[in-house]
Image (cartoon, grey):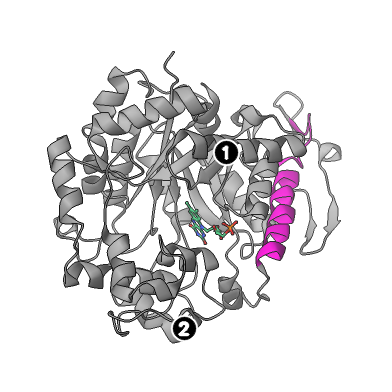
């Protein structure tokens, strides 16, 4: 039997001048105008998506590399997606919104209260994408932690959010107009937490959630500590993996094992694989695109290098394209995963010139053979097969939150998925949790 799939949207590169230079964006280029995002999110809701997750980084990066980050707007500027959330809620009724919040930056009490506020205002549609980036600590006067220590801090942070959300115990909210009694302080948890990373006192100055349930926790980390964090805490794991049955099964098994280790049921986590498909109208067109990308021209190489320079906080555009890249060029601040991503199919950096590395990135491949270019029917085939053969929960489509991008991705896909019975046609009434767990 066809298994229904959960779809979401990853608002990649965050609330910034997304799509800078792209002609399709020029018809409406006031990126600070909430109307663009409201229009896009309304369309995501019409399509039946569970939630929108908004990327964020509070920092523009290290001082030495500011120019590579901002000159083509790859790494900034960015506004805070938490404060965009109310506009998105106002434009919609059912879809969930989960902005990124850095567990190392926002004090847990404030984060719990902001989340509580938005969850109440949206009638249960709020979530938090919990990230552990350590490089922005200096902006708020905190020490920079190592990777694993940042996850330990995120564990403590998340458990504090939960404790604060639960600090209004059963019966704390009385709301008895006859007696005039609003609440009963003896039911509040005035705890004092002194942990490794935080000292926090409860209770939270926010009413309990009642039927709304708690805000959803989303996590994107793929390392051992990242998967353990998901197993312990997450309602949604944003997963990166090739879209084939074996890889998806293996990834799911690791998360489920982590969940069981922490006494949770595997059914309590939605594992959604992030994909950025390029959907076109015919297989011939898809083949043409793939062929055309086989030998990228200098403009395409320059474009790839500009984006990579920003992600890697290292200016690759000024290097000799026809020589191998010396990995010693990357400082300690650069993510090892991103460096591995640049090396791509090559075993060592000596095995390719910089031009070849960029060309490998520019080359597109066909759906369903591990690539992203194909028709809506082809993507639907992949989704349906993963649901049936790997018990897959669903996917997160990645792109900017602009109506043009949303249309490109969904106009042909949604009718196909609906016809096949793998995409919802209506929402329940239970907020983000119902979207994620109603089926
Ligand atoms: C799909 C995806 C989305 C992410 N979004 C963000 C983000 O918005 N902000 C951020 O600081 N880090 C983001 N990250 C980075 C993770 O939070 C994490 O720092 C990174 O994946 C390293 O952790 P890991 O070693 O456990 O993978 C994202 C990662 C992935 C895979």
Percent from the top left, x then y, of residue 324?
A: 37, 79
* Mark 1 Cα-neighbour bin, 10 Å: few <14, some 14–19, many ≥20: few
Inter-mark Cα distance, 1 to 2: 34 Å
Q: What element carries label 1?
A: helix
Q: Nearer the viewer, residue 95 or 322?
A: 322
Q: In terms of image quadrants, where is residue 145?
A: bottom right
Residue found 38% across the figure and 25% down from its top: 384
In-image side of 58 versus 411 (left or right): right
Percent from the top left, x then y, of residue 403?
A: 24, 46
Residue furthest top as drawn: 1
Q: Answer whether residue 128 is magenta in the image.
A: no
Residue found 79% across the figure and 35% down from its top: 169
Q: Nearer the viewer, residue 264 or 198?
A: 264
Magenta region: 147-173
Residue assigned mark 1: 250
* Mark 2 Cα-neighbour bin, 10 Å: few <14, some 14–19, many ≥20: few
Q: Nearer the viewer, residue 180 or 160?
A: 160
Q: In terms of image quadrants, where is residue 195?
A: bottom right
Q: What element carries label 2?
A: helix
| Residue 73 seen in the current view | no
Q: For residue 329, which numbered disc appears in the image? A: 2
């Amino acid at each position: 039997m066809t298994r229904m799939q959960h779809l979401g949207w990853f608002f990649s590169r965050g609330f910034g001048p997304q799509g800078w230079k792209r002609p399709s964006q020029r018809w409406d280029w006031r990126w600070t105008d909430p109307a663009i995002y409201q229009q896009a999110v309304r369309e995501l809701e019409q399509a039946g998506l569970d939630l929108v997750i908004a990327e964020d980084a509070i920092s523009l990066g290290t001082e030495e590399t500011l120019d590579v980050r901002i000159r083509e707007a790859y790494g900034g500027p960015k506004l805070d997606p938490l404060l965009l959330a109310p506009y998105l809620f106002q434009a919609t009724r059912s879809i969930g919104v989960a902005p990124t919040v850095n567990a190392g930056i926002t004090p847990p009490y404030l984060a719990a209260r902001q989340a509580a506020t938005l969850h109440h205002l949206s009638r249960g549609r709020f979530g938090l994408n919990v990230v552990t980036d350590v490089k922005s600590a200096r902006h708020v006067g905190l020490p920079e932690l190592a990777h694993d220590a940042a996850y330990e801090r995120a564990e403590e942070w998340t458990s504090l959010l939960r404790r604060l959300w639960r600090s209004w115990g059963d019966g704390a909210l009385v709301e008895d107009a006859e007696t005039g009694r609003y609440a009963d302080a003896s039911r509040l948890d005035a705890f004092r937490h002194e942990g490794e990373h935080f000292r926090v006192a409860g209770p939270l100055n926010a009413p309990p959630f009642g039927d709304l349930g708690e805000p959803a926790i989303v996590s994107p980390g793929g390392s051992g500590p990242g998967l353990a964090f998901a197993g312990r805490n997450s309602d949604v794991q944003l997963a990166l993996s090739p879209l084939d049955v074996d890889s998806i099964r293996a990834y799911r098994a690791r998360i489920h094992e982590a969940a069981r280790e922490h006494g949770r049921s595997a059914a309590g986590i939605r594992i959604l694989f992030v994909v950025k498909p390029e959907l076109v109208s015919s297989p011939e067109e898809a083949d043409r695109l793939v062929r055309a990308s086989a030998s990228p021209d200098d403009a395409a190489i320059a474009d790839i290098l500009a984006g990579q320079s920003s992600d890697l906080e290292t200016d690759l555009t000024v290097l000799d394209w026809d020589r191998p890249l010396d990995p010693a060029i990357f400082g300690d601040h650069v993510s090892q995963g991103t460096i591995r991503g640049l090396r791509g199919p090559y075993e060592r950096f000596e095995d390719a010139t910089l031009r070849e590395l960029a060309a490998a990135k520019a080359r597109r491949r066909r759906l369903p053979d591990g690539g992203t270019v194909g028709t809506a029917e082809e993507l639907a085939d992949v989704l349906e097969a993963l649901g049936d053969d790997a018990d897959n929960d669903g996917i997160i489509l990645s792109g900017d939150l602009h109506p043009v991008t949303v249309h490109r991705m969904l106009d042909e896909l949604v009718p196909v998925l609906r016809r096949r019975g793998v995409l919802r046609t209506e929402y329940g009434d239970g907020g983000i949790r119902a979207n994620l767990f109603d089926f």
